[in-house]
Structure formats: structure tokens, C-alpha cells
Amino acid sequence: MTPTERAIAGLPPHLRRYVVGQDYAAYTPRDHAVWRHVLRRLTAHLRDVAHPRYLAGLEATGIDVERIPSLDEMNRKLERVGWSAVAVRGFIPPAVFTELQSRRVLAIAADIRTHEHIEYTPAPDIVHESAGHAPFIADPTYAGYLRRAGEVGFRAIASAEDQAVFEAIRNLSVVKEDPAASEAEGRLAEERLAAAAASVRYASESTRASRLYWWTAEYGLVGTPEAPRLYGAGLLSSIGEAVHCLTPAVRKLPLTAACADVAYDITRMQPQLFVARDFDQLFEVLDAFTATLSWRRGGDHGLDEARRARTVNHLVLSGGRELSGKVVERFPGEPVAPGLATALVRLEGPVLVSRGGRAEGRPWPGEVVVAFGRAAIPERGAFEVALPGDVVLSGFAVGGGEVVHLRGVRGGRPMELPSWALLFASEDLRSVAGGPADPGAWDRWFGELSSFTAGEGEARARARKAAALPPRLAALYAELRRLREAGEATPERLLAIRDAAAAFPDDWLLRREVEELLPAVPAAPAHL
């Protein structure tokens, strides 16, 4: 197996289905020219302004300035530091990206930006993911931060509207990178994103986690506000941002966990950036942010956060049982544990029961009720139990938590509960975390219902990008690259290529490459 095949084989099926082959041979000569142009400009500028580990990190992770990196080459180097990389197409769901990162796997967008978007692209591409993120994986402190930030993002609770915004951003990136997309298509994509953003009711935990990640791993500075260095992948992979971020037009603020409350706009350069003291401070900020999450707080806070999110999340009960589903109702009660004053909570089906992240059987199709307090519910037979808050539950236990004829009374007044449900008791609520506790099992049952697909639009955009390169122009790019690498460039041949490129007035990159070589090529000796 190749290093990349080993990396893919090590992934669980629910993550593996988002992975694609790199198809290195599909990169055109112009694609390689785009990579070379961006990397040469970036490394020349970043030599003096990036964190000192950056340039060494390029070599340490198998990234060459002259050509698009092969994932196999990268993985041979990344294996030495306990990481790997896999190829994906464009935007993938945030939960997939963060889970991969928590497993020490970099998701590398296989596509590369067009020469029209050489300064900046709204779509993930191999320049950003490999030349931006990978170099600092060689730094063990920063690599540890990336892994933990992935885990935090994976456990944060996302709202239903977060999914709508993700789909809109993904659609816009596809349209922007499609050379045949019409103005009307572009306008509709922008309007869709604006509408999705307007639908957002509040900043979810997932949104706040993504902001923290943005202001550190993507757009972070390190050092002091007066003399910062670049380390964020968004800065390291964008020629325009790498220059602009150090100008007085951008405010440099000391990094704190409060950056998670600062929104960002992916369509423009950032008006302010945050400066970490050093990579160790990233952990301090991440720990302070994590302490605010339902994953760590649990209790009433976690239940309320999950209920307003309207998404699938999971509760960790006393004894280690996990319930994955949508929290739809919380019945307040008396304090039963630190941070928990809830009598009952109701989950909408389907609900997956698990322990230690491993599902126990099939998803339950109906509703689930959790009673908080010291309640002994029999495995089988009729029961009546009293709970804190003057709550009394009764019914008939069928086995495995299933009850029929469930009834609830609080202060002598009936409670609206499902008559048929799973019923569990818990003395506390240690955690309420984003997504299902067993993502693999949830995906096996409900994966085909996911709104994410490979996308006809993405496939069409890639095909149009390939077709947008005329064969004659591709041949000129290929010849120029061969002459450069073989050291056989002559002024006569370079001028001939430049003259031929005049037939393609919209393609400036080939002419730029010719002009780069001309001053370095000695003229042929004159014949007497």
C-alpha cells in the first residue's frame, strides 16, 4: 500500500466516503504553473515575516515550490510526526473536517485555484490546505493544538441554521470557481448565502469554535502586536492577505478567548487580527473557550443549548450511557446535581443508545425520556417512582428501557409525556456534546439521508476548468516547464513561446513565466 492508501485505510467508513483520489495526472501544466507562481511569491515574501518554522516546515512535510505536491510524498514525511493527509473535494461538512483533524489527519482539497483567482480563492484548494496548514505540523506544539482544536470543533453543538450556511458557502465556492458560470448564477449563489446568514438565530457553539479556529489556525499572528509573525494558513496561502495583514490598515489585538465572539467575513480581507504570545498560549485560549462548551458543562446549560440548536447531539448519563438524538423539551425541577435542576428531558426519535462511543443495537424509532435523580426503574413490570420536584412517573417496563403506558404527574397535575418510550434514569448529566456519540453507527443508519453529496455542480465546474485550457496553450506551458527543468531554455525559444502566447491574450501567467526566465538566459554567441 502507498502511504496515502494506508492513511485512507485507517479511517472509519463514515469518514472514508468523503475522501477522493488525488489523481495527480489530472493537473494541467497551467495548474502546476499556478502553484509555482503562488509558492515562489509567497516564500519570497514569507521568508522574513512568517514564523521561523514555516520554510523548514515546507521541506519537512514534502512540499516543493516547483510543482503541486503529491500526497504520497507528503504522507511519507507526515508519518514521521504521527500525522497523515487525505484528498477531499472542496468544502466538506465541518464535523467531518474537525473529526479528521482530531484524528491527526489533514483534509487536503485536491483542486487548485484558477489563474484568474491566483491572489485569493473562496474555495478550499491545495495551495491553502498543503502550503498553509501542513508546514507547521512539523512543530509538535502546534500540531498538538491543531488536534485538540479539531476535537473541540467536533464536540461543539451546531445549529440547524449552521448547516444551511455551510451548504450556501459550498455552493458559492463552486460557482465562483466555475469558468462557465453565468452572472445570474453568481448572483443567486450570493443571495442564497445572504439569506442563509440572515436566518441564523444565534451564534452556536460550533460557530464560536469556528471563529476561534479562524483567528488562530487560519488567520493567526504570533509574537507581539508591534512585531508579529504569520502562522495562520489563510495568511500563508494568500498573496494579498500575506502582504495586507502587516500594514497599519489591520489592527493587531492580543489573542484571548474573546476572539470566539468576533465574526469574520470570508469575502474580504480582515480588518483586525489576533496575536498569540507563542504557540503555548494557543492551548491556554483553547482551554478557556472549551470550559464554556456544553461538552464540558453538561447539566441544564447543555440541555438548553441542544434544545435551541434543533440538531442531533448526545447526552452522557451517569453510568456512561449515551443518548444521541434531538432534545425537544426540558421539564425544570429541583437541583439534583451541580448545574442540573431538571426533572425530565424528552428526546425526539430516532435515538441511538451507546456506551463509550459504541452503539448498542438499532436506533430507537420513538421518543426517549430521561428522569434525573435517584430513581430505580425496574427492568420489567409495573412501576411507580418519585423524583425530586414532586414528580411521579408510572408505567410498565417491557425491558431494555422500553416502557408502555408511561404517565407523569408533577404537583398532582398530569405531564405531557409519550405513552410509549425508552425511559432512563440518571443521577447527573456530565456532558451534552455535538453530533452523535457514535458517528459511524449513525452514518450507517442515516448516512444516505445526509444533504452532502459529491455534487454535480462541483463535477461540472472541474470539467469546465479543464476544458477552459486550450490544447495549444497547455502545450506551451508544458514546453516551458520542460525547458526550465532541463536547463535548455534559450532566448530564441523563449521569445517564440511568448509570441505564440499572444494568441491567448487573457492568459497572463505564461507570459509572466517567460519574462521570469529571459533575464537569466544568456544570449547565444553571435556567428562571425
Image: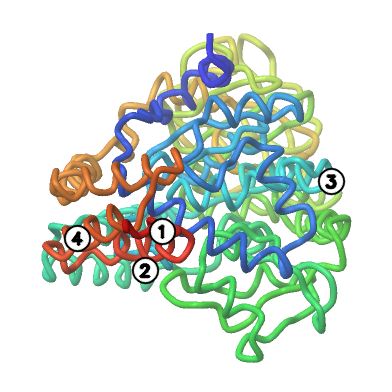
Q: Is residue 124 something that shows in the picture? A: yes
Q: Which residue is mark 2?
A: 199
Q: Residues within 10 Å of mark 2 (few under 14, many from 20)?
A: some
Q: Residue at x 32, y 66 (%)?
A: 193
Q: Which residue is mark 4?
A: 501
Displayed quadrant of residue 408:
top right
Displayed quadrant of residue 409:
top right
How far is mark 3 from mark 2, CA to CA? 38 Å
Is 358 situated above or below 157?
A: above
Callout 3 touching callout 4 (CB < 8 Å): no
x, y percentage for residue 471? 14, 43
Instruction: Kindly identify the amino acid type of the residue bearing the numbered disc 3.
Output: Thr
Q: Which residue is mark 3?
A: 141
Which colouring convention does the figure follow? rainbow
How far is mark 1 from mark 4, CA to CA? 48 Å
Judge left or right: residue 121 versus residue 374. left
Q: Residue at x 82, y 84 (%)?
A: 226
Q: Which residue is mark 1?
A: 161
How far is mark 2 from mark 4, CA to CA? 48 Å
Considering only order in the chain, which callout, 4 or 2, is on the residue closer to the N terminus? Answer: 2
Callout 1 touching callout 4 (CB < 8 Å): no
Considering only order in the chain, which callout, 1 or 2, is on the residue closer to the N terminus? Answer: 1
Given residues 283 and 406, the one toward you in this image is 283
Q: Secondary structure at mark 2?
A: loop
